[in-house]
Amino acid sequence: METVFRIESARIIAAVARIVRDVGIAEELAQDALVAALEQWPEKGVPDRPGAWLMATARNRAVDLVRRRETYARKLAEVGRDLETAYEPETAEPDDIDDDLLRLVFTACHPVLSADARVALTLRLLGGLTTEEIARAFLVPEATVAQRIVRAKRSLARAGVPFEVPRGPERAARLASVLEVIYLIFNEGYAATAGDHWLRPGLCEDALRLARVLAGLMPDEPEAHGLAALLELQASRTAARTGPDGEPVLLADQNRTRWDRLLIRRGFAALERAGTGPYALQAAIAACHARAARYEDTDWATIAALYGRLAAVAPSPVVELNRAVAVSMADGPAAGLAIVDGLAGEPALQDYHLLPSVRGDLLVRLGRADEARAAFERAASLARNARERDLLLSRARPDASAGRAAPP
């Protein structure tokens, strides 16, 4: 039941928000539908189409709510026969996006909210992420994220923000936040921050679909194509990133014949239309991996240079940590370790498990086994994902084989 709700919640909230015109109320009605399922399914059995059952229940409750309002007549005129019949998408205008999920993203990215609040709210509503997961993605306290979400819902309600996709300059102004939201949703699906499963394919699929739609809608926006290229190329590795039991498989050990060549071709095509922004640069890095038939053929010098350019246009401690990995492969582990040690005092990385993880890899390559084990143990203590924690603990064992400092 939890799995079904995590998969379907974004679509349910988006569809209900179209009726009630309030994303906060829409989320509450989606939760009400889940409560109804918890009450009825154990006795009556799980329906053949559980997602459709939840959707219908939430819509019916939305209709009842609107009918109870004093403004029912006006609302009925606005939503028309959507309230009386099965939900049908509105006829799209030439410059419109006929997709409720995208309406939800653009609504949550309204300028009435701060940039951080836009991203946090959309991750909550669209991705179904918990406040803890969002906090891990942002490297900020969980309480901070919870406050952002609550305040964002109130601000949207007070401002009477319409549930629609903006046009013209307003759409362009919101694009950066929308792209960031999609990027973070994909990342959570690509390497889950917590739980028993390392991959959450549903999030990756939603993010990839949204990125494709945005790129098609905005053909003259290079970063929209850059993000699409990045997600296509990253998604191409999905089948090779886990073993038979769901355990993570490091990039160096992946079977590249399992990489999806169609997604790689789509990524290359999108990259040709991208510019030189942060997403395009990350896509260019992913393309270097995709072009290498073997791990040993990877052009690490080019990757290190691309990370240098990325650090210049979008500086962050995480980008610098990734650059350290590439530099270690191009110039040796000592060069990479110098960069990693320089990041030790970064506040945002104090509880970031990949910092000691990368350091452990570099120490192994330098023959400093005892220090490496301590680093892997530290990384495991910080990891919230069970699969990733098991991998790190296995690296900490005395009999563990030497690793290579490359991300999964």
Image (cartoon, grey):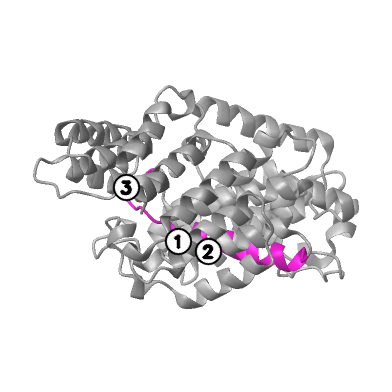
Q: Is residue 203 magenta?
A: yes
- Image location of residue 161, percent across then percent down: 82, 43
Q: Residue at x 47, y 62 (%)?
A: 288
The residue wearing badge 3 is 405
The quadrant of the rendering that contains the N terminus is bottom left
The secondary element bearing badge 1 is classed as: helix
The quadrant of the rendering that contains the C terminus is bottom left
The secondary element bearing badge 2 is classed as: helix
The residue wearing badge 1 is 201
Query: Front-most of 230 and 53?
Result: 230
The quarter of the picture where residue 22 lies is top right
Q: Residue at x 50, y 29 (%)?
A: 142
Q: Which stretch did the figure color magenta?
A: 194-219
Spatial separation of the CA atoms under disc 1 and disc 2: 6 Å
Q: Amino acid at mark 3?
A: Ala
User: Closer to the N terminus: mark 2 or mark 3?
Assistant: 2
Spatial separation of the CA atoms under disc 3 and disc 1: 25 Å
**Mark 2 closeness class: few <14, some 14–19, many ≥20 residues within 10 Å:** some
* Proximity of marks 1 and 2: CB atoms separated by less than 8 Å: yes
The residue wearing badge 2 is 205
